[in-house]
Image (tube, coloured by chain):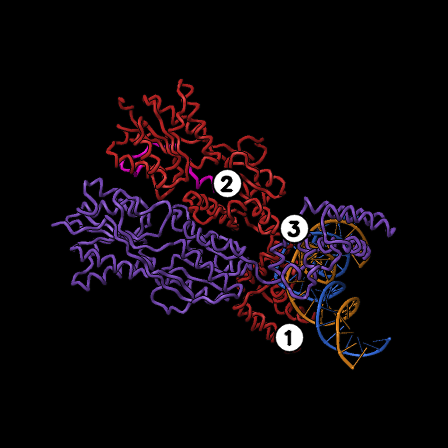
Chain colours: A red, B purple, C orange, D blue
Amino acid sequence: MILCTAAKVCVAMKPIFLCWCVTECYKTVRALTLKKEILIKIKALWEDALTMNVNLKQLAEMLGLSQTTVSRALNGYPEVNAETRQRVLSAVRDTGYRPNRAAQRLATGRAGSIGLVMPIAQGIDSDVHFGEFLAGLGEESVRHDFHFVINPSAPDDEEATFKRLAASGNVDALFLAYVRANDPRIAMLKSLSIPFVVHGRAIGQAADYPFLDIDNTGAFYDATRLLIQLGHRRIALINGPGNLTFSIRRAKGMRRALEENGMTLDESLVHNSLMTDEYGHRAMQQFLDSERPPTAVLCSSTVIALGAVRAINKAGLQIGSDISLIAHDDVLPMLKPENFSVPLTTTRSSLRAAGSRIATRLISRILKTGDYPDQELWRTELIVRASTGPAARS
Amino acid sequence: MILCTAAKVCVAMKPIFLCWCVTECYKTVRALTLKKEILIKIKALWEDALTMNVNLKQLAEMLGLSQTTVSRALNGYPEVNAETRQRVLSAVRDTGYRPNRAAQRLATGRAGSIGLVMPIAQGIDSDVHFGEFLAGLGEESVRHDFHFVINPSAPDDEEATFKRLAASGNVDALFLAYVRANDPRIAMLKSLSIPFVVHGRAIGQAADYPFLDIDNTGAFYDATRLLIQLGHRRIALINGPGNLTFSIRRAKGMRRALEENGMTLDESLVHNSLMTDEYGHRAMQQFLDSERPPTAVLCSSTVIALGAVRAINKAGLQIGSDISLIAHDDVLPMLKPENFSVPLTTTRSSLRAAGSRIATRLISRILKTGDYPDQELWRTELIVRASTGPAARS
DNA sequence: CACAAAATTCAAAGCGCTTTGAGTTTGCTA
DNA sequence: TAGCAAACTCAAAGCGCTTTGAATTTTGTG
């Protein structure tokens, strides 16, 4: 192709540099008495490049190279002359060229993205915890130039949404959270032949899939033991939704600690609900109004604790002396346990760190770099602050 | 192509139905004494379809149709025989076929996605407000089978990230939030030739771009007036980050109300920071410790109010009598103003509704359906609850 | 200086979809 | 029964990228 030749001449003289090139081109081409139209076309190409989006073909044409070589130069293949690579790179800088991701994906089958299904339903609240997790995920993703595709979905359509997402070819990996007791979605993910990580673990099925979970059982076991050691005998639990496995495990941890000490969990002292301030308040109030109110309470989130604390204050009770409280702390930046009027004793595990870790694992799997464990169980820290104290005589 | 013929025969007999088809095919093909291999291939195709992902080509082959026709049938073009369309649709149902979005996008130039840039930085907190907004966006998106692509970005790289996102061809529209005073990103978006909506408005540049904003000035003007009417003379403001336009406008509204009543805004009573519980607490404490503490305070978010209330309680003051408080309420489901120990007077505007509306507008622009105003300014509601009362004698 | 090996570069074939422009059928009219 | 719309359907050309396998140039060696 003639244009290529002209461009080649133009470029061969020196490393690409935009303004320079256009002028220099002119001379060279003239000297060679090539057709003027060609020159004009090259110049136009360069000028367009400044405002419009360039594509690989144009870029290659401008450089007098083939698409193959340019593509290789950009993707770090070894068989490209160092000088050529430099020219390509600076042309990219000059033109602001960005590969079209859709095309890239179509060609390679992968495109630097992680798919999430975001549970959405009118009336179902946006979850602070979700946002915090996302932040962690993002923090790590940005480092690898990954993005994530969020597909909102009604809860009853989630399974289909996952399938759709995977089949759409828009994502390289999937992420599942809010695991339910015997979650059918896990089996579905396994059948999907696309990498995934589960945040949490199912109950009642083989744990033969990649997951990251925190030791919920252990956390609440520890917390309960602390309370027992402090002399508490009636301990309440304001838990997350009862169908989610983390809630189930927390209750289990609590139950175990009680039973090891010859007590049983009084089911009337367990409350399951979404983890909001409001439900926390309502649950606590109900406990306090009951015939034999608890002397201590475990909250599955600091958000719940927020409401619980309010209810306790309203009842005129003093946290830490009249009633003890331990909350699970996801390290939400907007709600620090040490900032409560009475700093809270907590079991701590950063949700953001979990997000970040999951991103790391997913990305490494996609890129086939590094080697991370497939299953991780993080221990939580028990941090004692002022909200726990010896049981009051009842 | 022979296969096509065979498939055609097979299919012509009745509307497609998977199991039926495979069996029936067998007979038909046998009757016609066609080669057995062909039969086997068709059968294999159908069986694969159950587990693997089918693509358009395979689907067309299975149906004995051309890709063109199948594609047209799926995309609602009129020139397809009604019966053919039915056959295609039920085959889609049987096989679980999903078009590859990347390919679709490459071919059409659009792909049902909205791009967000999510501000991420180590140490910068995930924002509850962001999550709530996202929920609204999602709620609407899911209805149109749109998803969104979230590109996390360090703050200093945001402009480039937007460009990248647009050039990547991965999104059909962009969304901008957290508008700063004289925000260069808006001009950039305008130059990008891709639809966008700004949540908020810039200050100090022509408002000649699509936006959705709430009347922040009006909200805080109203709130301040209420306090003035109640006799308050020293009013403090715990605001969001000082470089964001909503903060600037809120301060402006407050200032205007004061000046209309012959007062000025005491800058020492204004605090700018991220909108977290912690900062709210700190700011309020500082105000209360000052020489002439305010008798009323405006908070830019209920999250801030949370901390402020804590500080007030700690100081032994009674909200509503000793000190009045008005907060802006984004209608965060986890933090309802009516659930505060003293229910809060608020200026209200649902962040989720805004997200949903922006999605609606963006999607309608992309699909070129409907016709929405390009610029919207939502008024806020002033809702009086128990946290405001007559100024105490000072 | 010849010739093989190494180093570069290239043309062309997809990836899975939409869409254009060109057939085939079918249904009527004359 | 020919002839011509109208109704369908199709083959093929992209969209912008990667990647294969081949062609070209350069380098090294006998």
Residue B299 at what x, y percent from top left?
27, 51
The residue located at (31%, 27%) in the rendering is A291
Q: Which kind of residue does numbered mark 1 sit on? A: Ile
Disc sitting over residue B93 in the figure: 3
Does the rendering let one see residue A92? yes
Residue most extreme to the top: A262
Does the rendering let one see residue A295? no
In which chain is the residue bearing label 1? A
Q: Which kind of residue does numbered mark 2 sit on? A: Ala
Disc sitting over residue A199 in the figure: none
The magenta-colored residue range is A338-359
Residue A364 at what x, y percent from top left?
56, 42
In which chain is the residue bearing label 3? B
Disc sitting over residue A38 in the figure: 1
Residue A313 at what x, y percent from top left?
26, 36
Q: Which residue is disc 2 drawn over? A: A177
Q: CA distance from mark 3 to mark 2?
A: 28 Å
User: Magenta stretch: residue A343 in it?
Assistant: yes
